Image: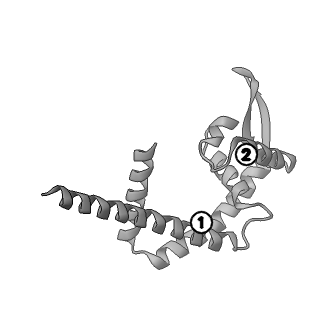
Amino acid sequence: MTVADTSRMTRSRKALANQAWESALTAHSVLMRRFAAEDVWHGLSMREYDVLYTLSKCDSPQRLSDLGRHVLLSQPALSRLVERLVERNLLSRCADPGDARATHISLTTAGRALQREIGLTHGDAVARTMTAALTDEELRLLETLTTKLAKEAS
C-alpha cells in the first residue's frame, strides 16, 4: 500500500468516523426533543429528572462531585438544580461524615416516588420509540457499540 493509498484510507476513515458521530448526535437530539415533548414530567425538566434517575441507581447518598460525573451539567448549574430539588422536597442534603466541607445528596421518599412514576411512563415511551425503529438485533448492537465507545473514552 502506498502513502497515497494510506492517506486516502485515513481520510475516508476519518470522514466515516465524523459522519457516524454526527449521526449519533442527530439521533440523540431528535429523540430528546420527542421525549421532552411528552406529558410525563410532572413539572420537572429532563435535567432535573436525570438527577433523580441518577440518584435512584445509587445505593447510598452521593457527594455533589460524584453526582456531577454522571450528569451533563457544570458544577455551578448542578448545584443550583440540586438546590431547587431540595426546595421541592425531592432531594435531601446531609453532612458528609468524612469531610465537613461536603454534603451528601439523596432522594427523599417523595423524590423516589416521583422518579419511579415518571420513569415507568418515560421508559414505556423510550421502548416504543426504540422498538418501532430497530430490531432486537439492532438494539443489542446499539447497546454493545455505545457501551464500547463509553468505556474506550473514559
- Of residues 130 and 4, the one drawn nearer to the viewer in this rendering: 4
Q: Amino acid at mark 2?
A: Leu
Is label 2 in contact with label 1 (beta carbons under 8 Å)? no
Image quadrant assignment for residue 61: top right
> Which circle's residue, 2 or 1, is located before the other in the chain?
2
32 relative position to 76: left or right: left
Image quadrant assignment for residue 124: bottom right
User: Furthest residue to the left?
Assistant: 1
User: Is residue 61 visible from the viewing direction of this image?
Assistant: no
106 relative position to 3: left or right: right
In this rendering, is residue 20 above or below 37?
Answer: above
Return the x and y of residue 10 as percentages of the image width and height. 28, 58
Residue on which disc 1 sits: 123
Q: Quadrant of the N terminus?
A: bottom left
Residue on which disc 2 sits: 78
Q: Amino acid at mark 1?
A: Gly
User: Furthest residue to the bottom?
Assistant: 132
Return the x and y of residue 137 as percentages of the image width and height. 35, 69
Residue located 70% across and 63% down the image: 118
Return the x and y of residue 114 as percentages of the image width and height. 74, 57
